[in-house]
Amino acid sequence: MANTLHTIKAGLHKNPLTPDPDDFSIRANSERTLGIRDICESASSRGGADVSASAMEHATDLFLKEMGYQLCDGFSVNTGWFTAGPQVRGVANNPREQYDSEKHTLLFEFHQGATLRKELANVTVEILGVADTEAVITRVTDVKTASVNDLLTPGRNLKIAGYKIKIAGSNAANGIYFVNQATSDRIRVDDSDVVTNNPSELIVVIPDLASGTYLLEVTTQYAVGSLLKEPRTAMFDKTLTVE
């Protein structure tokens, strides 16, 4: 692709989901997570934006609030860049059954739209080789909402997929932590709330977290066939939210 405008860097990671010991999964490296203000400031500084970053941020905030309002009234949204709509998951066991928040899950699903999909022609991927896979978190699933790499439901189960993430060893630092991005508080998952503890999957009960955004960390001395002298920490590269 001689005319590509963008490059996404990626690494090769051992793939624990297949029986082939020699294959790798390709995982994009996230530079960092951008908020609305970051994007508006970039649009202003790069050129092309005919309003100030603060004005754009204000207008974007108004748009997103109204979009959320309409989604909550059952409308679907198509911005061209992405589509969104409400989804109800769960089973009704008889024709008269009503929605039950303990049994059914209400969520909003977002997908790339046609405009964003066209931009793929302008993007190439640079594979940087085998990544440091000493311990990696690859996917986080909130069981209550079925949300992937996004939401957290306190008091309910969270599935954590990865590589070499089993909690093992006697070091006091070992464990699973949620780090509040606003306060930097580190909330540790109680050992009794670790339901499944395998090298490629952890299932835990999410602590009673306050509303906000969190980073997920797993600290362990686990290594294949042995224990490390010192613990190592795998940090998930996406932000998780308690609403």
Image (cartoon, helix red, strand yellow):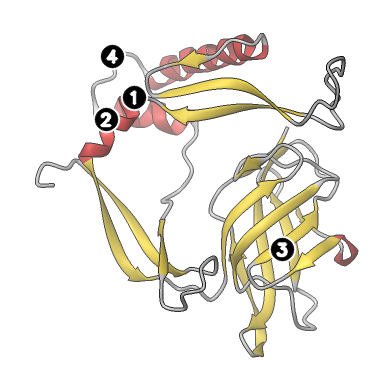
Q: Nearer the viewer, mark 1 or mark 4?
A: 1
Q: Which mark is residue 118?
A: 2
Pointer 1 or 3: first along the chain? 1
Type of amino acid under label 1:
Ala
Q: What amino acid does circle 2 point to?
A: Lys
Quadrant assignment, res 78: top left
Marks 2 and 4 in Cβ contact (< 8 Å): no
Q: Are marks 2 and 3 in contact (CB under 8 Å)?
A: no
Q: CA distance from mark 2 to mark 1?
A: 6 Å
Quadrant hosting residue 39: top left
- Mark 3–mark 4 Cα distance, whole angstroms, equals 48 Å
Question: Tag 2, which secondary structure?
Answer: helix
Is the residue 149 above or below the residue 22 in the image?
above
List the residue tagged with mark 4.
50
Residue type for callout 4? Asp
Q: Helix, strand, or loop for circle 3?
A: strand
Structural distance between the alpha carbons of marks 1 and 3: 36 Å
Residue 19 drawn at (x, y percent): 51, 73
Residue found farthest to the front: 94
| Residue density around tag 4, few if under 14, some if 14–19, many if 20 or more, within 10 Å | few
- Residue pictured at 63% horizontal, 51% vertical: 140
Discs 2, 1 touching: Cβ within 8 Å = yes
| x 67%, y 14%: residue | 72
Q: CA distance from mark 2 to mark 3?
A: 37 Å
Indicate the amino acid at tag 3: Leu
Residue 46: image location, x then y, percent:
26, 31
**Residue 68 position (above or below residue 177):** above
Which label sits in the foreground, 2 or 4? 2
Q: Which residue is mark 1?
A: 114
At label 3, counting other C-alpha atoms closer than 10 Å, the crowd grade (few under 14, some 14-19, many 20 or more) is many
Please tell me whether mark 4 sits on a helix, a strand or a loop.
loop
